[in-house]
Image (tube, rainbow, N blue to C red):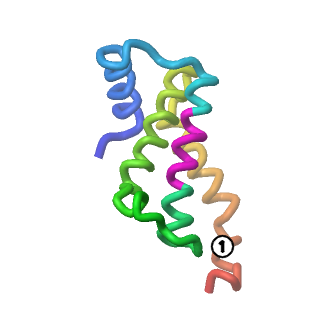
Amino acid sequence: MAGFTEIQHQVDEWIKNVGVRYFNELTNMAQLTEEVGEVARIIARRYGEQSEKESDKNKDLGEELADVIFVAICLANQTGVDLEKAFQDKMMVKTKRDKDRHQNNPKLK
């Protein structure tokens, strides 16, 4: 599997060669919110208590999650965020912070 650095480069090449240019950061933030909403709709109806409409039954959760990732990568690219480093740093923080917390949570047993 490709790492974040390779994926960020792949998205950047796609934007330059197919997408013409990045939408501005505010537009991409609005798009990210929209895509997360589509994921939430599928989860709420397929796995939650809401009934799933016939028109939603063919929606692909993987495709919608990929849309979220794509727009998040666009935002990272245009704001200079190295997702490879940011993700590794976050994993270290979460591991240190949550090392015992989840293991000792009786709700998770």
The residue lying at 41 percent from left, 29 percent from top is 8
Q: Along the horizontal axis of the image, is 36 left or right of 12?
A: right
- Rendering coords of residue 94 (x, y %): 63, 56
Based on the picture, tell me whether residue 101 belongs to the magenta stretch: no
How many tags in the picture? 1
Q: Nearer the viewer, residue 33 or 89?
A: 33
Instruction: Assign the C terminus to one quadrant of the image.
Output: bottom right
Identity, as a three-letter code, of the amino acid under mark 1: His
Residue drawn at point x = 49 percent, y = 24 percent: 77
Decide if residue 10 is on the left or right side of residue 107: left
Q: Residue 51: horizontal and vertical position, in percent?
A: 53, 71
- Residue 17, above or below 65: above
Q: Is residue 81 above or below residue 64?
A: above
Relative to 60, 97 lies left or right: right
From the viewer's side, name the closer residue of 107 and 28.
Answer: 28
- Residue visible at 60% across and 40% down? 33
| Main secondary structure of the magenta stretch | helix
Closer to us: 99 or 1: 1
Residue sitting at x 51%, y 19%: 23
Q: In this picture, which residue range is highlighted in magenta?
A: 31-39
Relative to 88, say whether 40 is above or below.
below
* Residue assigned mark 1: 102
